[in-house]
Amino acid sequence: MNTKIILIVGPSGVGKDTLLREAKKSLPEGFNFLNRYITRAPCSNEDNFYLDEYAFEILKHKSFFISTWNAHDNYYGIAKNSIKNGINIISISRSKIKDFENSYDNVFTINITVPKENLRKRLENRARETESEIEQRLNRTYEKIEAENLIEFDNSGELEVSSMKFVKLLKSFTDE
């Protein structure tokens, strides 16, 4: 099997980490879920590696990462050596899709979406931001996603239903 990259993108709060956590429980071996390196301690929904900014900058300088970005005052990175032969599933910033498309032939991007009011409730329940910060997130405009193979995924349904649909979508990449 050749290397396939499945990029998971979408605004903060749409449920990317929840869908990925549920998919890990259901998918057979052969699906490589990559952990991000982040300069923020992970919350209970995430499974990432925490680094302070100094350690992150050292690794970045030593070309440890295939892709890095800054979001919400934190640094994020994906280690080059974490990508394996087979299907690699990676939650990233939409601005970094080209980093992967420039390095790999089989890259697919899944854009996770929910209606604005669902997103508001999820952000409020997460309790990570102030009301003002939530409003800023909700009012942010996003440029059209530029990706060679873009798939839209509506995550506004019940968790069980959305998770089943998401797992089915990910399993479909074994057929390609």
Image (cartoon, rainbow, N blue to C red):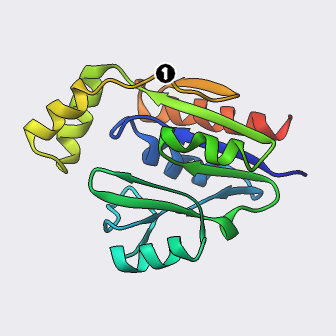
User: Percent from the top left, x then y, of residue 64?
Assistant: 60, 72
Question: Residue 65 versus residue 170: which sits nearer the camera?
Answer: 65
Q: Which residue is mark 1?
A: 144
- Marker count (numbered): 1
User: Percent from the top left, x then y, of residue 3?
Assistant: 82, 52
| SS class, disc 1 | loop
State left or right for residue 41 relative to residue 151.
left
Amino acid at the residue labelled 1: Lys
Residue 52 in sight: no
Furthest residue in direction right, as rendered: 1
Q: Residue at x 23, y 27 (%)?
A: 138
State left or right for residue 81 relative to residue 54.
right
Task: Classify 140 as above or below 92.
Answer: above
Is disc 1 surrounded by few (<14), some (14 to 19) or many (20+) residues within 10 Å?
few
Using the rendered view, name the quadrant where residue 44 is placed: bottom left
State left or right for residue 152 relative to residue 57.
right
User: Percent from the top left, x then y, of residue 105?
Assistant: 81, 42
Residue 79 in sight: yes
User: Percent from the top left, x then y, of residue 175?
Assistant: 86, 35
Q: Residue at x 58, y 27 (%)?
A: 146
